Amino acid sequence: FLYPGMSVSSQTNTKLGGTTSDQSKIVTDWYKSKIKELGFNTNSAALTSTNGNVINKLASANREYKVAISITKNSGETSTHIDIEIE
């Protein structure tokens, strides 16, 4: 689930966090495609954009794993933040 070109700032066995200079919509669309490509079949998405602040939350599961992805971008910032948790 490592986004191409993502600069990783934190990593554990189940969590990954970092940033990219790509727009939040591009990042969100990439993760939606990746979830589908990997065959996850239970999907949830909450996409919010208010006053230039973006908070997109994706969640999906298959028989083995659950994944939660948070994509955020604050107004005035150039980086999109990505946080991924896999259970």
Image: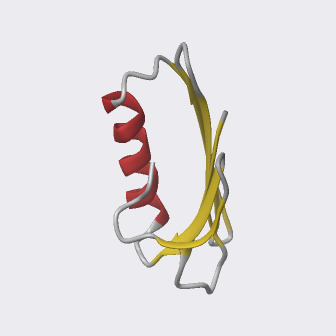
Residue at left 43%, top 46%?
31
Closest to the observer, 31 or 25: 31
Question: Going by the image, does 6 lie left or right of 50?
Answer: left
Residue 77 position in % (x across, y down) = 60, 84
Residue 66 position in % (x across, y down) = 62, 28
Closest to the observer, 81 or 54: 81
Q: Is residue 14 above or below residue 16?
A: above
Question: Going by the image, does 9 lie left or right of 38?
Answer: right
Q: Is residue 21 above or below residue 57?
A: below
Is residue 46 among the parts visible in the rendering? no
Residue at left 55%, top 19%?
64
Residue at left 47%, top 17%?
41
Residue 32 position in % (x across, y down) = 42, 39
Q: Is residue 76 above or below residue 13?
A: below
Residue 9 sits in quarter: bottom right
Residue at left 45%, top 22%?
40
